[in-house]
Image (cartoon, grey):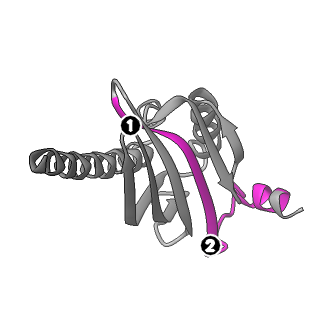
């Protein structure tokens, strides 16, 4: 009996580490504009609630197309920084939370001109044959520096406020 408890605790620790690595991949692939690999961090039927951003997106392909189509032509460089990651594992399902600081530079030759914002994430994950995948995301931006010159997010913020 005691061994089973130890094995369960080890499995939870391994799952939490795998989830943290998954979210690191999520950030790294977005920062490389590698939208195909980024989209692969989601389940096929994933839902992404992007409050103050692109609104609700349903399905991996829609998430991919919306984010790629809205950001590729605007930013030359992106940096996603996540902190305070916290995960709860329940068998083949998990939940998580984290904070995001996003920086987008429109012209790499002008790194002092940038858009920066911060938000909070909430996730639901599902274990699949390919490992952990994001089944549901809720991202709410809570601040920005007002430097979104090309209004990638401003239009959507106005729509959600209306």
Labelled disc at residue 92: 1
Q: Toward which corner of the image does residue 154 lie, by quadrant? A: bottom right
* Side of 28 where 55 appears, left or right: right
Q: Residues within 10 Å of mark 1 (few under 14, many from 20)?
A: few
Instruction: State whether residue 98 is above or below residue 7.
Output: below
Q: Calculate the distance from the C-alpha at mark 2 to the C-alpha at mark 1.
A: 36 Å
Helix, strand or loop at mark 1: loop
Instruction: Name the residue located 55 percent from the left edge and 57 percent from the top edge.
Output: 106
Q: Position of residue 132 (x, y in %)?
A: 37, 37
Instruction: State whether residue 95 is above or below residue 146.
Output: above
* Side of 101 where 8 appears, left or right: left
Which residue matches tag 2? 144
Q: Residue furthest front?
A: 1
Instruction: State whether residue 36 is above or below residue 29.
Output: above
Q: Position of residue 126 (x, y in %)?
A: 44, 37
Q: Residues within 10 Å of mark 2 (few under 14, many from 20)?
A: some
- Note whether residue 116 is visible: no
Q: Toward which corner of the image does residue 140 lie, by quadrant? A: bottom right
What count of labels does the image hold? 2
Q: Which label's residue is closer to the chain start, 2 or 1?
A: 1
Helix, strand or loop at mark 2: strand
Instruction: Name the residue located 9 percent from the left edge and 46 percent from the top edge.
Output: 3
Magenta residues, as a range? 131-159
């Amino acid at each position: 009996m005691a061994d089973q408890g130890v094995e369960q605790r080890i499995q939870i620790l391994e799952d939490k580490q795998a989830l943290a690595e998954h979210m690191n991949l999520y950030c790294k692939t977005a920062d490389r504009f590698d939208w195909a690999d980024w989209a692969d961090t989601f389940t096929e039927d994933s839902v992404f609630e992007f409050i103050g951003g692109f609104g609700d997106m349903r399905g991996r392909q829609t998430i991919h197309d919306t984010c790629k189509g809205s950001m590729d032509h605007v930013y030359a460089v992106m940096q996603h920084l996540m902190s305070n990651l916290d995960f709860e594992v329940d068998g083949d399902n998990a939940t998580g939370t984290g904070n995001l600081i996003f920086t987008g530079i429109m012209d790499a030759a002008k790194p002092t001109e940038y858009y920066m914002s911060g938000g909070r994430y909430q996730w639901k994950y599902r274990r699949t044959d390919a490992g952990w995948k994001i089944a549901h995301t809720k991202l709410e931006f809570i601040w920005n520096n007002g430097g979104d010159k090309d209004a990638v997010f401003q239009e959507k913020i106005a729509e959600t406020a209306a």
